[in-house]
Image (cartoon, rainbow, N blue to C red):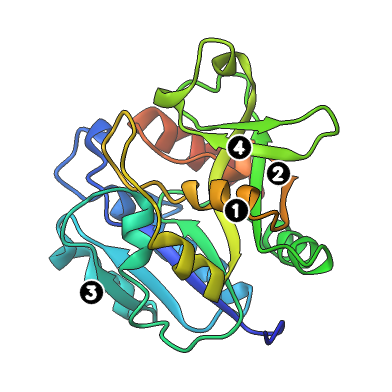
Amino acid sequence: MNDSRLAAIILAAGHGKRMKSDLPKVLHKVGGVPMVKHVIRQAGDAQADPIVVIVGHKRELVIPVVEEAGAKYAVQYEQLGTGHAVQAAEELLNGFDGDIIVLSGDVPLLTRETIMKVIEYHRQNEAVGTIITAIASNPEGYGRVLRDESGDVTAIREHKDCSPEQLKIDEINSGIYIFRAKELFESLRNVKNNNAQGEYYLPDVFQQYFIEKKKVVAIPGDFNEIHGINTLDDLADAERIFQSRQ
């Protein structure tokens, strides 16, 4: 594997129903700029090439913004989960040999420093997959990170699939990852949708890595950087954080 190569996949196909807006969620603006453009810039700052944005809901509005920002796009024609979304990029990344960072189109506040730290941690540990986590004061709705007594990650569990005991865990999965490209797409072919949502979850590839004894690591980030924008209140909070950095 060529450790110096990095590609990016940005997930931007969802409806964003809780925004209560006809505008696709990733086109809502922070600092006067559509969220997805911030995320494309994040990928560019990490020197990712190519950058592939997964579009779906109202893609006719999202595609021009993606192209204007200099990124490629792939279409997820049905929204069947994050694992299904990443698979949509496989054709554009055919033959790519390196690492893939998976970013979310509704996480505009991630800093270059955090991204570079995660890439370095992933490569230093020779991991097949790396997860950015965070401690959340209110983890409602987020997937949880399960660890064993020695602190190693043993599972990533979606909120709706957690037991009552697991729901008490405050370490959450940010939905931001780095994978080795070859292993990622191989593993996605084995992901099933036997879960509460009936979707193909990207984090389920980690369960395969655990079974196969492949190295998975998790690195904590700042919740203010990694949390997604799901409501107009979240958007207002993100704007405040963004302006405080200026």
Image position of 111 (left or right of 37):
right
Q: Kindly give the residue lying farthest to the top in the view shown.
A: 164
**Disc 1 residue crowd, few under 14, some 14–19, many 20+, Cα 10 Å:** many
Mark 1–mark 4 Cα distance, whole angstroms, equals: 24 Å
Q: Which residue is mark 2?
A: 221
Asked whether the beta carbons under mark 1 and mark 2 sit within 8 Å of each other, the answer is yes
Q: Which residue is mark 1?
A: 110
Mark with earlier residue (1, 4):
1
Q: Residue at x 73, y 57 (%)?
A: 215
Q: Which numbered disc, 4 or 3, marks the residue closer to the eye?
A: 4
For badge 4, the amino acid type reads: Ala
Q: Which residue is mark 3?
A: 64
Q: Earlier in the sequence, mark 1 or mark 2?
A: 1
**Residue 241's spot in the image, x, y percent?**
58, 40
Tell which of 107 and 168 is nearer to you. Answer: 168
Judged from this view, the residue extending furthest toward the front is 212
Q: Earlier in the sequence, mark 3 or mark 2?
A: 3
Of tags 4 and 2, the one toward the viewer is 4
Depth order, front residue of 49/88: 88
Q: Which residue is at 51% across, 70% downward?
A: 41
Residue 155, labelled with which disc? Answer: 4
Helix or strand or loop: what does disc 4 sit on? strand
Q: Secondary structure at mark 2?
A: loop
SS category of the residue bearing label 1: loop
